[in-house]
Amino acid sequence: MTTVLTPASPLTAADRCDRCGAQAYLRVVLASGGELLFCAHHGRKFEPELKKIAVEIQDESGRLGSTTTATAADDER
């Protein structure tokens, strides 16, 4: 039997940190098949331990540094 791994879907605002409930930016896939979600703060805090038990770590915390440009006209803001 061949196992096909599908890429993890991007994290959204609906994905919440398992520790504090903030928006998740890290998905940690465990060998058991489970996954943990963490905000950037808790992902950094627990990183050493997570690396020991993770099969994969999906880190999208780089999105925190991106800026968004307003597209509404000045009179609509």
Image: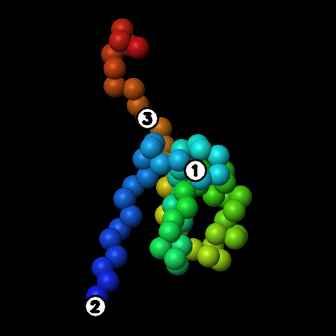
The quarter in which the C terminus is drawn is top left
**Which amino acid type is marked by label 3?**
Thr
Which numbered disc covers residue 60?
Answer: none
Which numbered disc covers residue 1?
Answer: 2
Report if the CB atoms under discs 3 and 2 are less than 8 Å apart.
no
Which numbered disc covers residue 17?
Answer: 1
Task: Give the vertical position of 67 relative to 34 (above or below).
Answer: above
- Image coordinates of residue 29 in percent, x first then y, are 51, 69
Instruction: Please tell me which residue is depicted at 47% across the width and 48% down the height of the picture.
Output: 15
- Image coordinates of residue 10 in percent, x first then y, are 39, 55
Nearer the observer: mark 1 or 2; the answer is 2
Q: Residue placed farthest to the top in the image?
A: 75
**Which amino acid type is marked by label 2?**
Met
Nearer the observer: mark 3 or 1; the answer is 1
Q: Residues within 10 Å of mark 3 (few under 14, many from 20)?
A: few
Under circle 3, the secondary element is loop
Mark 3 sits on what residue? 68
Report if the CB atoms under discs 3 and 1 are less than 8 Å apart.
no
- Image coordinates of residue 63 in percent, x first then y, are 49, 48
